[in-house]
Amino acid sequence: MNTPNNPEQTVAEVSAMSGSLVGVRLGKYEVVDEIGRGSMGTVYLGQDHFAGRNVAIKVAHPEVLQDPVRGSTYRKLFFNEAKIAGLLKHPNIIAVYDACVDDGGGYLVMEHVPGGRTLKDHCTPDKLLSVDEVVGITFKCAKALDYAHRKGVVHRDIKPGNILRTAEGEVKLSDFGIAMITQLDATETQLDGAVGSPLYMSPEQIREEQVTQQSDLFSLGVVMYELLTGRHPFSADSFASLVHRIIGDSPTPVTELRADVPAGVENIIGRALEKKPSERYRSGVELAGDLSLVFDYVELFQDGRAGTEKFDCVRELSFFRDFTDPEIWEVINASRWQDFSPQERIIEEGDMDDAFFVVISGEVAVRKGEKQVNLLGEGDCFGEMGFIARQQRTASIVANTAVTAMKVRASLMERASKDCQLRFHKAFLNTLITRLSQTTEKVGD
């Protein structure tokens, strides 16, 4: 066995070796430990003493690259991943630092992710993550895919096993071996046909039709569904049945399988899993944008108030007097509750924002410059003109006492039912009439 002090090994010499490579030097990299072993190769922990960092080294099994049938294909995978490494530099994509591949063997030197485990661990009913964790993971994946797509790279194999998650919650996309580079001069190292993992293929991949960035978003939708439910959306007993379901069937709604999934997430998954690419999200950033709205919903569970407690509070407010119970729940699910200390500024005159507030408890002052022009209390709303007209704030709002307020964004309310939206506009109109009447009385006095 070689030691770290022995000369560097060539690819051919490595290929002739059997057993573990721990202690061997591959180029400038010292192999320290074995991390994992698969059908195509073994991944080792290595040290790059020049850069002062640990790395992961994926070493191809020699018999795989030299196989008369599969060897050419697997060499393409290594070359392809190495080529793409030069294109992608993103915090949520595993970086590939170096590669060495020839007819005798090959290895890839990649970013080492300490404690990284694939999402496969969280795709069973007994190990599901929370809704907000799944939303956060999908958000980061969507942003990473958007970056790759803008660089001309389509992954083509998005699945739980190709997404790493660290103990700190960081997310990394990996394994771009079968990715497609859309630049015309990069086709020599790429694989054609129905490549990928059948369980996560889009309908167009199954049919061996043109694959685009929206194919990756379909696959990400499948992953999100699995992470939330522990079930595959198109599970089947045979490959033929799987193909039929991916192409023609709609999955069971996520909300029927998991009660704490909000309707907004259900809608996002439904759009990601549309059969026609033209009906899916156009880009990863568009998907990420919708997911970012869901974060407002998720934050509901972080302020220490139970949903029933919020419902009881809202039900008693005059602003919501004409709302039905289901409509009140829609509002609660589209809002964020915030606490403010006395003299804390809630809205700043001149700011641009599409949110409005309803006072749950406490008292706020409406100020124009340094002049107080009104006082608002429990059940009153403010900021409605920014919500309706997307205009600059015409006054500042400052908490007179300790205040709890419900903040509702227009972008979230646009997803509410039409009846709920009409009820809001009626409540706003009543508020404006009341304030106009009060102003008229003051002028008359």
Image (spheres, rainbow, N blue to C red):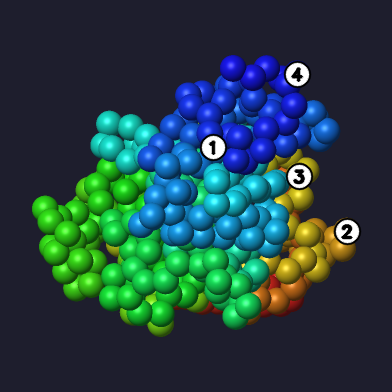
Question: In terms of depth relative to the viewer, which is nearer, 11 or 232?
Answer: 11
Q: CA distance from mark 3 to mark 4?
A: 65 Å
For marks 2 and 3, the one nearer the N-term is: 3
Q: Mark 2 to mark 4: distance in Å?
A: 75 Å
Residue 168 in picture, x, y percent from top left: 58, 31
Separation of disc 4 and disc 1 at Cα?
20 Å
The answer to whether residue 19 is above or below residue 385 is: above
Question: Of the residues shown, which amino acid type is indicated by label 2?
Answer: Glu
**In what quadrant of the picture does the N terminus appear?**
top right
Is the residue marked by circle 3 packed among few (<14), some (14-19), or many (20+) residues within 10 Å?
some
Numbered tag placed on residue 5 in the rendering = 4
Give me the C-alpha separation between circle 2 and circle 3.
14 Å
**What element does badge 3 sit on?**
loop
Q: As shown in the figure, which amino acid type bears the numbered disc 4?
A: Asn
Rendered image quadrant of residue 83: bottom right
- Helix, strand, or loop for circle 4? loop
- Nearer-N-terminus badge (4/1): 4
Q: Amino acid at mark 1?
A: Ser
Q: Which mark is residue 370?
A: 2
From mark 1 to mark 3, how far is it between C-alphas? Answer: 68 Å
N-terminal of the pair, mark 2 or mark 4, is 4
Crowding at label 2, few (<14), some or many (≥20) Cα neighbours within 10 Å?
Answer: few
Nearer to us: label 2 or label 4 = 4
Is disc 4 surrounded by few (<14), some (14 to 19) or many (20+) residues within 10 Å? few
Label 3 near label 1: C-beta < 8 Å? no
Give the residue pinned by disc 3: 344
- The residue identified by callout 1 is 15
User: Could you tell me residue 21's position as x and y percent?
Assistant: 56, 25
